[in-house]
Image: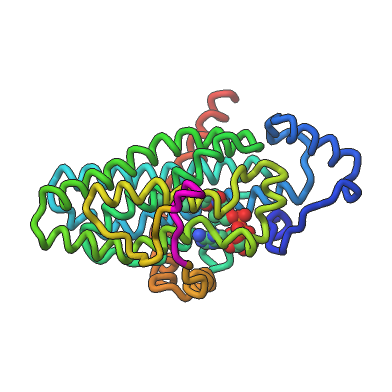
Amino acid sequence: MYAQLVDTGLSRVQSDADLSALEKQFQERIDAGIRMEPQDWMPDAYRRTLVRQISQHAHSEVVGMLPEGNWVTRAPSLKRKAILLAKIQDEAGHGLYLYSAAETLGVEREDLIAELHAGRAKYSSIFNYPTLNWADIGMIGWLVDGSAIINQVPLCRCSYGPYARAMVRVCKEESFHQRQGYDLLLEMCLNGTPEQKAMCQDAFNRWWWPALMMFGPSDGESVHSAQSMKWRIKLFSNDELRQKMVDQTVPQAEYLGLTVPDPDLRWNEERGHYDFGEIDWDEFWAVLAGNGPCNKERLQTRVDAHENGAWVRDAFMAYAEKQEQRKAKQVA
Ligand code: BYC
């Protein structure tokens, strides 16, 4: 089932001549801004694209708990520990909303998770980088959740109802996540010691470029964007959103007194945007191919967690079965 429903091949934009009558009606509804619901007719390729994107997104939320999870026991105060725990729990919740949204398209959550654990499903490249010091936790909130918000706010208006609705709550929570990251960095950069400020600059140097990579390959290399934009699954291109992230984040870095690690960064008066340097796309594709600094560790940790949690799932199932038997007896 999963293999049939996940689009792994290159997509191409369908011309009007390619479309059947049903597909034409579907496209007209999309163009009119009508949202699709699970019971509505939809082209197989639209369904497959959604399953691919939503399941990758769900996996990203779940794997995304790991880099921050490393710091729960090392948070510098009870307050920071409580905040970090709450944030990580939110990410688990996001994974659950998203797996549920994917299930409305006819796939099973177990199958999606099995694909992740087999190393066949993607999740966001950003979570294959290590968290080496406490400032990294601030960077994840500020840059990673910050990028996630820029990418996900438009998804609240995407054409598939369950995905769009899940995104509304996710975005509200991501907004709190970004603020906690920035607040942590404000404390370290403006009120901290010179060593703490240096720790923030070191973390910034390591997270800036991977955060820009989160938006995906440049528009010329993005295989899915054109069709996804026609279907209003994506409302903006990868490069448009990346530019928004740079424009929004540079003044925030200046306020913290941090230097953006990009010698080519400069304000372009004519464009009304920052120009920025070339992303190391070889690094991006290497991370996607499984060769980032932490890919193997992240996947192994997820597989171990799943296997070690088998008894919890078994216990829930046994309890549910008992309840069913009890109910059946009462009815009889
Ligand atoms: N990492 O044609 P393209 C979070 C893949 S969670 C890995 O542009 P598309 C958070 C792409 O899948 C953040 N893979 O694709 C959580 C495709 O491969 P396949 C996750 C990437 O789908 C916890 C190929 O490259 N957010 O923020 O049109 C704590 C070609 O790309 C990446 C979402 O998932 C990448 N960075 O656009 C804190 C948002 N980029 O599938 C924070 C929803 C590209 O053909 N997803 N690829 O094998 C999207 O908006 C889109 O799927 C993307 C990619 C913009 C990511």
Quadrant holding the C terminus: top right
Q: Is residue 269 magenta?
A: yes
Q: Residue furthest front?
A: 270
Which residue is located at x 32 percent, y 60 percent?
Answer: 260
Image region (quadrant) for ligand 1:
bottom right
Q: Residue 142, percent across and down?
A: 32, 49
* Pick the front one: 270 or 260: 270
Which residue is located at x 27 percent, y 43 percent?
Answer: 180
Q: Is residue 73 above or below residue 158?
A: below
Which residue is located at x 22 percent, y 59 percent?
Answer: 200
Q: Point out the stretch of residues depicted in magenta.
A: 268-277
Q: Is residue 172 above or below residue 112?
A: above
* Pick the front one: 45 or 96: 45
* Pick the front one: 197 or 107: 197
Relative horizontal placement of residue 107, taking residue 286 as reference (left or right) = right
Q: Residue 242, percent across and down?
A: 49, 53
Relative horizontal placement of residue 167, taking residue 20 as reference (left or right) = left
Q: Main secondary structure of the magenta part?
A: loop
Which residue is located at x 55 percent, y 50 percent?
Answer: 240
Relative horizontal placement of residue 110, taking residue 148 as reference (left or right) = right
Quadrant for residue 83, please give it. Answer: top left
Q: Residue furthest top?
A: 331
Q: Residue 251, percent across and down?
A: 32, 47
Q: Is residue 121 magenta?
A: no
Quadrant holding the N terminus: bottom right
Whether residue 262 is visible, yes or no, is yes
Whether residue 127 is visible, yes or no, is no
Instruction: Name the colouring of the figure.
Output: rainbow
Q: How many marks?
A: 0
Q: Residue 78, percent across and down?
A: 14, 45
